[in-house]
Image (tube, rainbow, N blue to C red):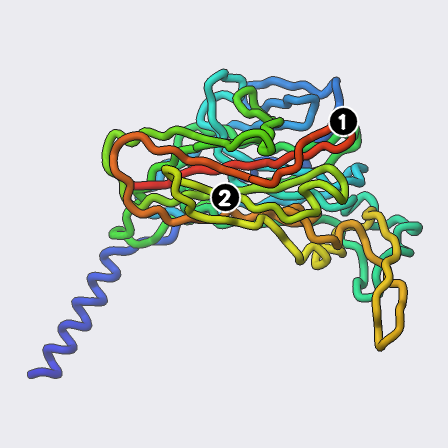
Amino acid sequence: MIKNLSKVLIVLSLNLIVGCSTEEKKLTIDVFSSQKINFDSDSVLSSSDFLIRDNGRLIFKKLSIPEFKRKVSVEIFAELSSDGDPWDKSGSIFLLNTHPDSLNITSLELLRFITPFGVGHFSENERLDEFRPVYIPRWEESISWSEDISHLSNAFYDEIWIGAWIDTWSKEGWLMDVSLSFTESPFFMDKKNKSKIKVLANTHNYNLNHNGSFDFSNEDLKINFNTPKDISNANLYFITTGHGAHSEGDEFNQRDNIIKVDNEIKLNYPAWRDDCASFRRFNPSSGVWFEETTFKGETIKERIASSDYSRSNWCPGSSVKPVKIRLGDLEKGNHVFSYQIPNAQPTTDKFWNHWNVSFYLTYEN
């Protein structure tokens, strides 16, 4: 009797699983393909679904996103190669829900990256091949990054604009591929993500509403946010990179990044990477010189590239993953989010410092 009952339960369970599932739905959208991003005053284009702005350094593509009925995972993929630009530059891929030329828009950053020194265009240069370390068999032809952005799945609906920006100042610039992959759960009971998304700040200078020259040495970045109802499962995400002022500036010196919510410190973050040398194979045009070190009791000279040095989240060839701070429940009312870099070096006539900071909130009502 018990054995028969067990068999019945197993059959019912299998039927339940089959009845509550369907085929997994996958969709890949190619956003940009070998798209040129450069600095050229003649590079301006407007069409119904593609725009070029900022003298070619900023591009936009309009997409139509189908409706998904169940939980969706989202991944962004980007591949980059130099078309003649030898320098490391900040770059970003972001999402807009309104036309890029609108005055009142906010940009949701999907992927931050730092271009390497000349990958692709300079990878077959015989002169630069002399600077290739013995532990690297070849210079890479391109660099790619992928990021799971499923926590932002609710931002992808109806018509959206995807933008890509590189802070290049060369006419040669870069070539870039970008794609988005959506995978819908096969299970009928796997309900869609309920999270809402609120962009709080973005100091990139790729939009009229973004202040690319925010000076953290003079003030903190403060954002007021009102919640008309109590919210739950709140998470704060932020992305930050520091650059400029040569060896004396914030790029090559650790600076505390302090995040506060309602005047309470939630995180004191060093914003520092010491693994930049791991990207050496993507940096053929990086400057190289010698430094003295000790090996087996003797002082020797060892080659080191500029791309090898530790930096403020600015490893040439790296992507910059967002840092997540769990806030939990927030009561209705006004809240203040602040971002502070207490020891940020001021910009002077000789030294220029710049921090790119973006942060956003996900939550449920």
Query: Which residue is at a point 84% across and 65% down the rendered structure image?
Result: 293
* Residue 217 rendering spot, x and y as whole percentages: 60, 33
Q: Depth check: 261 or 70 in front?
A: 261
Alpha carbon distance from label 1 to label 2: 27 Å
Circle 1 packing at 10 Å, graded few (<14), some (14-19), many (20+), is few
> Relative to 1, is 51 above or below?
above
Q: Depth check: 232 or 46 in front?
A: 232
Query: Which residue is at a point 43% across and 41% down the rendered structure image?
Result: 260
Query: Which residue is at a point 43% across and 34% down the rendered structure image?
Result: 65
* Residue 134 rendering spot, x and y as whole percentages: 84, 65
Q: Is residue 87 left or right of residue 213?
A: right
Q: Which residue is mark 2?
A: 258
* Residue 36 rendering spot, x and y as whole percentages: 70, 32
> Relative to 203, is 9 above or below?
below
Q: Depth check: 255 or 34 in front?
A: 255
Secondary structure beneath label 2: strand
Quadrant of the rendering where the C terminus is positioned: top left
**Image quadrant in which you'd find residue 215:** top right
Circle 2 packing at 10 Å, graded few (<14), some (14-19), many (20+), is some
| Residue 36 makes an appearance in the image | no
Q: Is residue 148 left or right of residue 83?
A: left
Secondary structure beneath label 1: loop
Specify the amino acid type for callout 2. Ile
Query: Which residue is at a point 35% across and 46% down the rendered structure image?
Result: 327
Mark number, residue 364: none
> Relative to 204, is 81 above or below?
below
* Residue 142 rendering spot, x and y as whole percentages: 72, 48
Specify the amino acid type for callout 1. Asp
The reply to whether callout 1 and callout 2 are in contact (CB within 8 Å) is no
Mark number, residue 349: 1
Q: Is residue 110 left or right of residue 281?
A: left
